[in-house]
Image (spheres, rainbow, N blue to C red):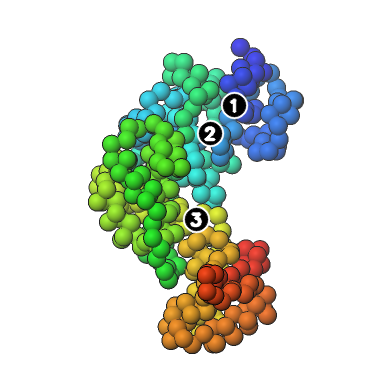
């Protein structure tokens, strides 16, 4: 079958393909990362290799380059309920195609840990050769008719696999140094009800609790960890909660479950605006009262994952270690920050008989994000 015909065959499966020079793995066509598929194939030669474009929301490739990593990947995917996925053979090993959600934006490719074997996980800004490409006299081929599974490929969560890549090697220094948490709020009942359901919930099944729903156990655990963190729970407290409730997906990690929890929490700390807030926090090096107040405000924003939130001057006084009745100093410090364009302040209202008061609202400047 001519490569143009194979390209059209893969089109019908919903795949994004690109031509690669015959007998080679490189180079791809110019603009391969963003150009439409038809444009990439417009002037392609009749004889060429064919690759599949990987990326968020599309596909990831779990590659094994030896029997050790192949055994591990197959076992791990089976544990996650992925029993029959597209899988093709290259000269050195196998390529397993899956969908992975919530991969951190700074990750394109990661090697497997040395204990797992040789190979890598490819997530974005990359591609993989597929049948019937040929390199060094080896022709790629699909395992059976596994390619038909592209049409209904399930999705796993980044936390399901992250611990087994070299990405996790960099977490030790970050997990013990989150931004301070100055307050703890009550956790809604759905959080603990969800943990209770997760004890015996089957793999790969839809889960619902109150008004919340998830397509997998790992997604539900991620939501629970996110909420406990935003309510002010420390890592040790979250670990204790998970040990008590023992949700099934978490327990399957065995001796690695603490590592899994650390990795997941690290992902939580990388959600939305939090990375920019963490970076900005580290630029505040002074020790004046405005500096102390600003560190507190950035920490609160990080905990709540928002630039706008309620807080009283009395609370700010307490958080920087002075008498909560000494509100004038924190107020002056906040006005100074506002004059510098770092925050804006929306004045609260006094409590009156029959009417609840409102705390002052602080909004961190979007310049914080623009400069990070």
Q: State the residue at coordinates (50%, 64%).
A: 302
Please state the horizontal and vertical placement of residue 264, each as a whole percent of the image.
40, 51
Tell which residue pokes out farthest to the top in this image: 1
Q: Which residue is mark 2?
A: 59
Secondary structure state at the residue bearing disc 1? loop
Q: Name the quadrant containing residue 113.
A: top left
Q: Residues within 10 Å of mark 1 (few under 14, many from 20)?
A: many
Please state the horizontal and vertical placement of residue 231, each as a whole percent of the image.
42, 60
Give how far apart the Cα atoms at labels 3 and 2 are. 22 Å
Instruction: From the viewer's side, name the closer residue of 249 and 205.
Output: 205
Direction from residue 149 to residue 364 in the image, left or right: right
Instruction: From the viewer's side, name the closer residue of 189 and 353.
Output: 353
Looking at the rendered structure, which numbered label has been put on residue 15?
1
Q: State the residue at coordinates (43%, 15%).
A: 144
Secondary structure state at the residue bearing disc 2? loop
- Marks 1 and 3: in contact by CB < 8 Å? no
Q: State the residue at coordinates (29%, 48%).
A: 257
Please state the horizontal and vertical placement of residue 364, each as a whole percent of the image.
61, 69
Looking at the rendered structure, which numbered label has been put on residue 324?
none
| Residue 311 visible from this viewpoint | yes
């Amino acid at each position: 079958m001519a490569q143009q015909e194979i390209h059209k065959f893969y089109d019908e499966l919903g795949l994004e393909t690109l031509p690669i020079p015959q007998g080679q793995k490189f180079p791809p066509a110019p603009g391969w990362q963003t150009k439409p598929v038809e444009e990439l194939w417009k002037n392609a030669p009749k004889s060429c290799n064919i690759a599949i474009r990987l990326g968020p929301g599309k596909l990831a490739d779990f590659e094994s380059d030896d029997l050790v990593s192949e055994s591990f990947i197959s076992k791990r995917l089976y544990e996650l309920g992925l029993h029959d996925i597209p899988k093709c053979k290259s000269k050195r090993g196998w390529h397993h195609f899956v969908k992975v959600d919530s991969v951190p934006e700074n990750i394109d490719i990661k090697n497997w840990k040395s204990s797992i074997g040789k190979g890598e996980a490819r997530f974005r800004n990359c591609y993989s050769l597929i049948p019937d490409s040929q390199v060094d006299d080896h022709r790629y081929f699909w395992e059976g008719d596994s390619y038909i599974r592209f049409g209904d490929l399930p999705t796993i969560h980044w936390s399901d696999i992250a611990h087994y890549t070299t990405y996790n090697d960099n977490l030790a220094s970050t997990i013990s140094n989150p931004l301070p948490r100055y307050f703890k709020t009550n956790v809604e009942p759905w959080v603990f009800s969800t943990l209770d359901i997760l004890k015996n919930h089957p793999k790969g099944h839809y889960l619902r609790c109150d008004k919340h729903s998830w397509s997998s156990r790992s997604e539900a655990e991620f939501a629970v960890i996110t909420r406990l963190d935003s309510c002010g729970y420390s890592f040790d407290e979250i670990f204790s909660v998970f040990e008590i409730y023992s949700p099934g997906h978490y327990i399957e990690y065995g001796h690695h479950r603490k590592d899994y929890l650390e990795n997941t929490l690290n992902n939580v700390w990388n959600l939305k605006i939090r990375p920019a807030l963490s970076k900005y926090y580290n630029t505040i090096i002074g020790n004046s009262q405005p500096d102390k107040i600003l560190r507190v405000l950035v920490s609160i924003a990080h905990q709540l994952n928002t630039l706008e939130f309620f807080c009283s001057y009395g609370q700010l006084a307490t958080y920087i270690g002075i008498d909560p009745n000494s509100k004038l100093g924190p107020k002056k410090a906040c006005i100074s920050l506002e004059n510098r364009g770092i925050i804006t302040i929306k004045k609260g209202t006094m409590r009156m008989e029959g009417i609840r008061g409102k705390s002052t609202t602080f909004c961190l400047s979007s310049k914080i994000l623009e400069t990070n």
